[in-house]
Amino acid sequence: MNEPDWLQLDAQLCFRLYTASRVVTRCYQPLLEQLGLTYPQYLVMLVLWQDDELTVKGIGERLKLDSGTLTPLLKRMEQAGLLRRERRADNEREVRICLSEAGKALRDPAKAVPPALVEALGMPLDELATLRDLLDGLIAGAKS
């Protein structure tokens, strides 16, 4: 059996992951447009719908984003009325993020997004769950 040429594009895991990420994000776009959210904003909302009143650092840890990337996003979301950014009285450097009433109200309409995404991707749910689990293993095992 011949060894694969690892410098061929088709042999690259990174290319498949990159392409798959773009495909999935593109499938999300029309679904999130109905909610008035971008994909990064949706990720922030998912974190806050699960655990409201987190610090910027806490959200960044969950999303694997640094504060330099996250802060402008959170400012735009605050301007859109989705959340509030509050400095903690006991530690002025720490900013707590809280959902606004509008942000909380968006949760119910957002429940339609995951099933619509599954349909848009055209893969059975069990295969998508397996893929998610495999990616979790890849992320956990990577030496970064």
Image (cartoon, grey):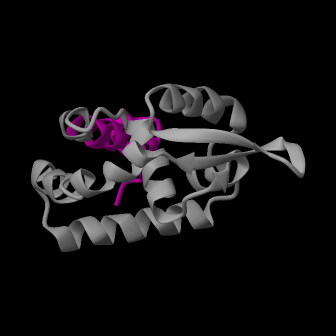
Which region shows up in magenta? 1-27
The answer to whether residue 120 shows anywhere in this view is yes
Note whether 99 is above or below 9 in the view shown: below
| Drawn side of residue 73 relative to residue 128, left or right | right
Position of the N terminus by quadrant: bottom left
Q: Is residue 26 magenta?
A: yes
Determine the main secondary structure of the stretch shown in magenta.
helix
The answer to whether residue 13 shows anywhere in this view is no
Note whether 48 is above or below 6 in the view shown: below
Q: Is residue 53 magenta?
A: no
| Drawn side of residue 27 relative to residue 100, left or right | left
Q: In x, y percent, where is residue 144?
A: 70, 52
Instruction: Out of 73 and 121, give the one closest to the viewer.
Output: 73
Q: Residue 133 occupies which quadrant of the picture?
A: bottom left
Could you tell me which residue is drawn at 63 percent across and 42 percent down?
Answer: 65
Note whether 107 is above or below 76 in the view shown: below
| Drawn side of residue 79 relative to residue 110, left or right | right
Could you tell me which residue is drawn at 64 percent across and 39 percent down?
Answer: 85
Q: In x, y percent, where is residue 134?
A: 41, 68
Could you tell me which residue is drawn at 42 percent across and 48 percent down?
Answer: 101
Q: In x, y percent, where is residue 98?
A: 57, 49
Q: Residue 107 occupies which quadrant of the picture?
A: bottom left
